[in-house]
Every structure is written in C-alpha cells, then in structure tokens.
Amino acid sequence: MLTTPERRLIAEPRLTTTVPREYVHRAALSEVFLTGWEKTGTDAFTVSAQWPRSHSFYAPEHDMHDPMLLCETIRQCGLLLSHTGYDLPLRHRIGWTRMQYTLNPQAMRVTATPAEITLHVTCSDIRNHRSVPSSMVMHIEAVRDDSLLAVASIGFSNYSPAVYERLRAGRADASRLSESAPMPPDPVSRSVAGRRRRRDIVLSPTKERWRWQLRVDTAHPVLFDHPLDHVPGMLLLESVRQAGQALEPSWGALMPTSMDVSFNRYVEFDTPCWIEAETASPGSVRSRRSVRVNGLQGGTFAFTATTEMTDVTSL
C-alpha cells in the first residue's frame, strides 16, 4: 500500500513556468512566451511555448491567433538557445539578418485554452569566435496539438559589448536614444492599418497611397518593453504586416501567412524611415495576395520583405 507522501507525489501535476525573462531580453514577465527547453541532439533542441488566448498587442482577429505571436516566439527562441545552448553571455547583443516563416492558418485558431506550442529547432551555419557563436541560423518546425503550425528560420549575428559599441559608433546608449527619439507622426486610420488601437499603428500617411513613414512610438509598452538604441525588428515586421493591409484596405481582413524579411542595417530613431509596398503577384486570387515591402532610410534599403496576405474570412 502506498504511503501518504508517495500518493501525494503521484497526484501532483507537473508544474509549468516561463523561462527567465533575461534569456529572451524582456522586462515584463507577461511578455515571455517560452516555457522550457531541452537539448535533443547535436545542435538540436526542443522548446516549449504557450500563447495566451488574448494579448494587449498581438490580439486575435476572427478567432485566429496573430501571426506576430509566432514571430515573437521565434525571436525569443533564438535568444534563449543562444544563451542556454551555446553559452552566449547575457550582455552580448543579437542582431537579425533574416527571418522567414510559412504557417498553416488552420492551426492558428483560438480555442478554449491557451495554445501549447512545441518548437523543434536545428542550428546550422554556426561560426564561433572565442568559443561563443558569432552568427548562426536556426531552422524551426512549430507544432500545435500534433499538427504542423509553421516552418521558419532565423539568421542572426552576435556582438560582444566592445564590438557592438564600435559597430554602433556612438549610438549604443539605449536609454538616451529612446528618450530623445522624435514624437511619432499621426498614424493612418485604424481601418487602413487593420489595427483596433491608434497607438498600435506603425504607419503614418504620405501623399502616395503605397508609401508611408514608419511611425516609432518608443513609449509603446510591448514594442518597447525596455529601452533600445534602434528600432526593433518586431516593429519592422509589424510595418510589413500593416503595409500589406494598407496597400489595398478593400481586400478585407488579412493575415500574413508567410514572410521573408532580410535586414540590411539598423533603423535609427532620428531619421525618417519610409515604408513602400507593391503587389508582387497581380494575377493571384483575391483571397491571397503576395506583397513586396521595402524599408528605406537615408537613401538605402534598411530591410526588404515579401509577405503573403490571406483573407481570413476565406479560411
């Protein structure tokens, strides 16, 4: 017969928590989506995540989770495994070079419980400097309830504090630069951006309907969860999504079911960044449109992107 302590041990459920917020470079615990990780092979890992049924910024639409939740999860996955799997010091900086994903919209539906996500990660193209990775690519298969949710990859470079200081040439003071950033210009309308709240809109109108000024609000509680010395990658991804919607708002409620974004240089606070978009496949079906989006600052391409925008009412 089992003793009382043994019976209590068997009856106890498995406890779940998030990974330390420092590993994913977040200040707010509520913005940490990863719940655990384990090494499964040479340069292979499994990471667990949970998505909330509702979120202040990545809000569901038409009972579908926001694909930007996937992007933020991928971002956090790259940071977590760099620090825990490859011993990258916490003070090192990480900069994206490329991010790609293609998702299964049917697996994005909101259900009665938070979404439990498993990410199978394989790392490649690892370049080391002084025993820590200076760059790598992570390939990710995201699974939800035994169904494929998405395939993705993210490439990034890592910089020691000294190297980052030289790279940024006097622009590495995050607190000073965030505080001195210009006030954001007026946004496009909510219906054009496809966002419910004014403060979540990252595009400002220009005379051309296919061109906008990037709207950077350094007081935004999610996009600027902590002070930064440049415009964060998640804000740039959000500009791609909103530009895909704003290019032709009459297309309806659109979901970015795929993206391929190359990051060429940091986007600074003190110079306007222009977002330009065009339809990449004019002959495509109405429910699914491919859009090219470029971000230009100082006369050069800060990033280039393509995204497939899918009408969620057709799913």
Image (spheres, rainbow, N blue to C red):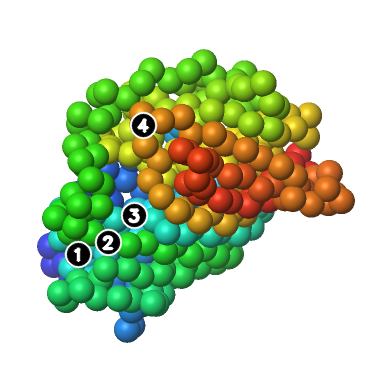
- Mark 4 or 1: in front is 4
Tell me the residue that label 4 is attached to: 269
| Residue 244: x %, y % from top left | 66, 39
| Residue 85: x %, y % from top left | 24, 70
Kindly indicate whether the residue at mark 1 contacts the one at mark 2 (C-beta within 8 angstroms): yes
Give the class, few, some or many, for how many residues have Cα within 10 Å of label 3's Cα (few <14, many ≥20).
Answer: some
Q: Is residue 79 left or right of residue 315?
A: left
Residue 92: name its quadrant. Answer: bottom left
- Mark 2 or 4: in front is 4
* Residue 95: assigned label: 3
C-alpha span from label 2 to label 1: 8 Å
Kindly indicate whether the residue at mark 2 contacts the one at mark 3 (C-beta within 8 angstroms): yes
C-alpha span from label 2 to label 4: 22 Å
The number of numbered badges drawn on the structure is 4
SS for dot 1: loop
Tell me the residue that label 1 is attached to: 88
Please identify the residue farthest to the front as the structure is shown. 299
C-alpha span from label 4 to label 3: 17 Å
| Residue 134: x %, y % from top left | 27, 68
**What residue appears at the point 15 percent right and 54 percent down from the top-left corner?**
161
